[in-house]
Amino acid sequence: MRTKLVSLCTCLGFAVIAGKAGMVAMTSQPADQGVSRAFEDPIRRADIVDRNGELLATSVAVYSLFADPRAIWDPAEVASGIGRVFPDIDVDKLTADLSDKERAFVWVRRGLTPRQRQAVFDLGLEGLDFREESRRAYPRGTLAGHILGYAGTDGQGLAGVEYAMDSELLSSREPLKLTIDSNVQFALEAELAAAAGEYGVEGGAGVILNARNGEVMGLASWPPIDPNRVLELDRDDPARLNRAVGALFELGSVYKPLTVAAALDTGAIRPSDRFDVREPLVISGRTIHDDHPISGHASPTRIVADSSNIGTVKIAIMLGARRQQEMLAAVGLFDRSPVEVAGSAAPLLPEQFDEIHAATVSYGHGIAVSPMAFATAFSVFANGGEVVEPTIIMDGKRRRTRRVISAPTAAVVTRMLREAVVDGTGRFAEVAGYRVAGKTGTAEKPIAGGYADDENISSFAAIFPADSPDYVVLIVLDAPKEGAGRGRTAAYNAAPTAGRVIERVAPMLGVEPKFEDLGRGESPMVRSVSQRRSSL
Amino acid sequence: MNRRALMVGIAIIGLLIFSLYRAKYGAIESAEEIAAVEAEIEEAIRERRVLLGELSHLSRQEWVEEYARAELGMVPARAEQFARPEDLDQLIGPPDGVDEIGELRRDREGGTNG
């Protein structure tokens, strides 16, 4: 009996042990349970590419060095060793930081190259470890620098598309595709830089816009910025400003086609009307005159082509301030541009549209907008009277479109713009075969207390090809200088710059040159704008 | 009889427990192998990103343009250098052996070509 009882107890004991062993064998503990995870996985931002998939921004893995002072026996030795790898490090400060046993974590250096990481590793020092981080790299340097913006060391977007699309870049693994073409962008930036050198400007901006669908093909600001080196720039460095989106300019006479279009569309004037522009106008004590007086009576076409302030103001009076404001609001000039680049500037508008302000706004003074906003407004002539909301993100979404003027009105004004290039102030923008239509703008540069007497904001707004326009090109130059045989008005700087841009980008955009107007058998070897350039 | 059954039962239970033990640790080994392969994949992806970045860097237009100009003698095309296929005959003349109206050119002393 006792033997059986002992056997039973022994069997039960073995059964309990076996059962427990089986339970341990069957259940498993996750490998990392109970291990402290001090760091999260590195933040990986999605790549940014152009419309053709060319890489513009990517994230690369880098290693950052940190120390645990609690695990360091000799802080001076460790700091000295690190100083041999990084000669620029403050060894005394590092020694003090590593001596603080209250701290468990001290950053030593972030963004190590693989070689630096290996050099530190080879030191064999105590209390040091590496953390893998993700750093943003921009392989194309300054190309599209202002568009892209940059991200901080902790992976957050701080400017440009990096800021505007921050959440999308953090949450998506797929590349973010922009509407820009990197070759078009390069050509625009190159010509803007050449213009900066040739005309001695303080700044510049350029926009190339597909008027049909609102896609931004190129957006440039001079001086350029390299997102890889932005942290090295001073806070007030002029390169930080994206002049195409974040700066406001009084653009001058490029507004005249908008005034004329509004007057034609509302029936306030007709294309056959004639206006006496021989005598200056006086409005509210202010005299409005023409820099290049027109003799006789001028048609609306001649007023646009020869850029008559007097004629434009007379048209604006017939239009009326209310309808003038409606036109400007309809083309988007009363709002900041909705393009998806951080820092889009809101316009500066007159406090009230009284008689004198309505007059000056008609020819582009007293109202300051960004080049991106004005390029969008000017696209009304390239898109049959409609304005499409601009975008720089290729997401396949249909953009908001609104009709501003009728298609016949847009066509009439386009012919006026063509005349301005063929026989007006914009003749230096002409490019053989591409039928450029456009308008110059030369405005006194605003300074504290008024306007400068000897500095301009020069601009040229173009659409091409004039017979079936698809694209808008806008060039804005800040304070171009005069040169030998060359004034400082837009006819001599912004206009030829726009022509050179069009000449370079038109083939890339698939715009076919046409020489039908030269007749069969005639050579199309007309002189192009690039041959008139003094350099390059 | 009871003792034999007990021993057999214990042996079977032991065998089952041992099998479970092997299965679990076999699974752990497989998981480690999978983790190693995933790490290799991650490393390859990382290396690919670096290579794509380097490719983009080396494709910078200013360098390509400089090389094209200096080494290949190329310059950007001008508008007058473009032509549509239907204009080629006018610009550079018809192909050899075909006159302007597209007929085979006949030998002036008679007979036909070919």
Image (tube, coloured by chain):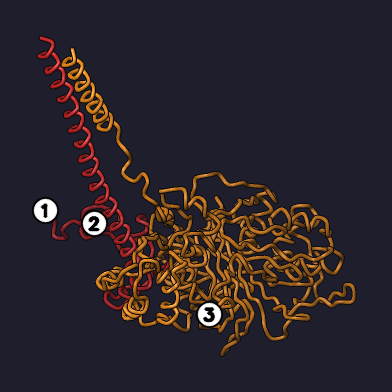
Chain colours: A orange, B red
Q: Which amino acid does label 1 sit on?
A: Gly
Foreground label between 3 and 1: 3
Viewer-nearest residue: A146 or A430: A146
On whether disc 3 and disc 1 are found on a single subunit, the reply is no
Query: Mark 1 — residue?
Result: B114
Q: Position of residue A208 (x, y in %)?
A: 53, 62
Viewer-nearest residue: B80 or A99: A99
Question: What kind of element bears circle 2?
Answer: loop
Distance from label 2 to label 3 (Cα)?
Answer: 53 Å
Residue A515, compared with residue B113, is above or below; it is: below
Query: Mark 3 — residue?
Result: A196
Q: Quadrant of residue A358?
A: bottom right
Q: Point out the image quarter for the C terminus of chain A.
A: bottom left
Q: Where is residue A392 in the image (x, y as percent from the top left)?
A: 52, 55
Chain for disc number 1: B
Q: Residue B2 carries which label?
A: none
